Structure formats: C-alpha cells, structure tokens
Image (cartoon, rainbow, N blue to C red):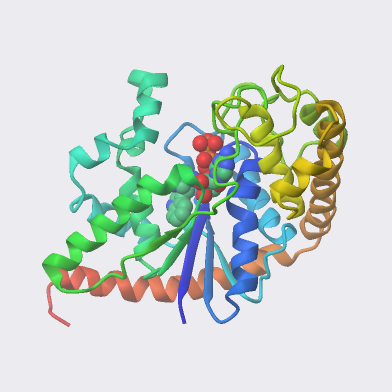
Amino acid sequence: MKRIVSGIKPTGTLTLGNYIGAIKQFVLLQQSMPEDEFFLFIADLHALTTPQEPTELRKRIKEIAGMYLACGLNPEKTVFYIQSEIKEHAELGYLLQCFTYMGELERMTQYKDKVKKQESSLSSAMFTYPSLMAADIILYDADFVPVGDDQKQHLELTRDIASRFNGRFRDFFTVPEPIIPKVGSRIMDLQNPEKKMSKSDESDKGYVSLFDDPNIILKKIKSAVTDSIGIVQYDVDNQPGIANLLTIYTSMTDESIENIVSKYNGLGYKEFKEDLATIVSKKVGEIQQRYNEIISSNTLDNILDQGRQIAQQIAYKKLEKCKQKLGLGRKRK
Ligand code: ATP
Ligand code: LTN
C-alpha cells in the first residue's frame, strides 16, 4: 500500500488551474489507486507567508475543504485535515530547515519571482517555506505527491532534504516522488498565455475561479486572448492562447486534442470558444451546486475532525522518532 499526500494553500480563490492541475488529478488518482492511502490537507501555514486578513483566511480554509469534496474526492477514502491543526508540521519544518542549505532556497524560482515583485516586504517564512513543505510530505512518509508543474522544484528539494537526512541517520524518511500530469500541469492566464493562471493575480480577468458565477465564466472564456492565425490547432510557440484553451478543453472533456482539433477544422475561434465556455461554465456550475449542499450540511467539520485524529497519530509518532534520532529529549527511548 502506498501513501499519497498533497495540499493546497488557502490564498485567493481556487482557480480552474488548481482544479485541472491538482484537484482533478487527486480525484483520478483516488479512482485509479483504490488500495492506496490519500492524505489531503489545507496548507494554511503556507498561506501566512504573505499577509492574510484573518476572517478571509478562516473562510477560505473551509472553502477549500468543501471544494475538495465537491470536486469528487471521497471522504471515506481520503484523510482531510488542516495543516495548522497538526502542530508537528511546524516543528518538523523547523528541524528540516537545519537540513536545508541557504543556496538551495535561494535557487527556488517561486521565491526569486516574489523577490522581483515585492522586494523588501517579503517575509522570511517565504524564503524558508520549502522546508515546511518538505515536512508536510515526509512527516507522513509519502510515496507520491501529485502537484502542478510549478511545484516540481519544491518536490526535488524535498527529495534532497529527505535523502540528506537519510544519509546521516540511515533510511528514516521515505523519499517521495512527484506525480505531475502530462496534460494540464500548467494552465495559463486567459489574458496573458505566457503566464501561469494564478489566484494571486491582481486582475481577475485572466483566471476562472471555481466560485465565479457561470455567466461570468462564459464571458471570461469567450474573451480569452487568442491570435490572428485563425486556425484551431495545438502550437504552443505561435498560438499559446489557443494551445491553452485546447488544454482546458481536453482536461474538461477527456476528449483528445486531435479530436477537438479535427472537430473545429474550418471553423473559426468564435465557435470553439463558445463551446468551451459552455463546457467549463456547466462543469463548474455542477461543482458549485455540490459545494453549496456540502457547505450547508454539517458534515465538513466532522470530516476535518476525523482527518485530524488520523493524521495526528501518524505525525506524532514520526516526529518523536525523528527527534530521538537527532538527540533531542533527555532520555533515549
Ligand atoms: P498562486 O497562484 O498564488 O501561485 P497556487 O495556486 O500555485 O498559488 P496552491 O493553491 O497551493 O498555490 O496550488 C495548489 C496546486 O495547484 C499545486 O499543486 C499547484 O501546482 C497547482 N496549480 C496552481 N496553479 C496551477 C495552474 N495554473 N495550472 C496547473 N496547476 C496549478
Ligand atoms: N507549496 C504548495 C502547497 C503545498 C503543498 C504541500 C503541495 C504546501 N505543502 C505539500 C504538495 C505537498 C503551493 O504553493 N502550491
């Protein structure tokens, strides 16, 4: 039996990128690996690396939990929990900082991008956050970590940190492997297809939020930036906008890109975009309906309580053993 672990930060809203690159993959994995254990958490400590309004943050934590379920994850097969409710994450995060080199953190592109944008107001937690992410994963001896393309580098660092620890203290942590979808691991901004679709974007025109009104979704997709070539075909270099829309289309319908391209052969972008807009707004509308039912029932808190209990036990044992290895604690147990 293998263990799969992943998390999502409760910053901004959930986007179509989060759905296609991460949540949909979680659902597929859950279906294709029914014997394996699934641990999914809400990475609220990670959210605090940038300033958050407390009421908003509290609301978003619940939103993500509700969306995990609304998108089709089964609470009977998945352990859902909130990262900050398991104190071991933060403690192991600190311990792993002692096994992470400054140079490694300085090379993280996500950090480098933030430095470029925010300069002096950047928190030190933003810098050290990959060590906390490593802790989130290896605390549970995860075998696999499904993530979008932007997290690949953090996963590589996680593997290096785990291997470094194992090198000093004999094999102690499982070295995890990323699972990155072949298609849809990097959904691009609808207004600027050179840039990742991001929930932290200042303008909301470039992303579809899973909470957007279906009519707004129609508009956003229909006004996605394309090009003047006028042929629906998959050419990332010359038609990045259309390539991105094709990726969204195939991800939302499971129809192959080849099929989609031949379906729109001889037709213009207008028809293609209209169809895609309908597909996305309908699918997101269905997710929203399930979300509203989940949020208005009282099941969410129970699910998160149960998840906390299960995760807590595993995390406590692993951290205790880790501290022993390091020589912390007065007595050798
Ligand atoms: P931000 O947009 O602020 O950088 P984020 O959406 O990348 O944040 P998370 O919410 O923690 O941060 O991401 C959750 C998961 O969604 C991660 O696995 C991430 O790789 C994936 N993901 C995020 N954006 C995209 C995207 N545009 N395309 C595909 N996957 C994505
Ligand atoms: N760093 C990720 C969110 C995240 C995560 C994790 C993903 C935090 N801890 C552990 C997978 C496993 C992000 O910013 N998207």
Report x, y in % for residue 32.
61, 73
Residue 319 visible in this rendered orientation of the protein: yes
Residue in the image at 62% along x and 42% along y: 17
Residue in the image at 66% along x and 69% along y: 302
Count of picture labels = 0
Residue 328 visible in this rendered orientation of the protein: no
Q: Is residue 207 above or below residue 90?
A: above
Report x, y in % for residue 228.
72, 16
Residue situated in front as seen by the camera: 119 or 166: 166
Residue in the image at 62% along x and 55% along y: 23
Q: Quadrant of residue 78?
A: bottom right
Q: Quadrant of residue 91?
A: bottom left
Residue situated in front as seen by the camera: 17 or 326: 17
Q: Is residue 116 above or below residue 280?
A: above
Q: For this view, does 185 lie left or right of residue 256? A: left
Q: Is residue 181 above or below residue 206?
A: below
Report x, y in % for residue 155.
37, 52
| Residue lying at the far top of the rendered structure | 228
Q: For this view, does 263 lie left or right of residue 94? A: right
Q: For this view, does 18 lie left or right of residue 141? A: right
Q: Is residue 307 above or below residue 63?
A: below
Residue situated in front as seen by the camera: 63 or 289: 289
Report x, y in % for residue 176.
36, 64
Q: Where's the C terminus, which quadrant? A: bottom left
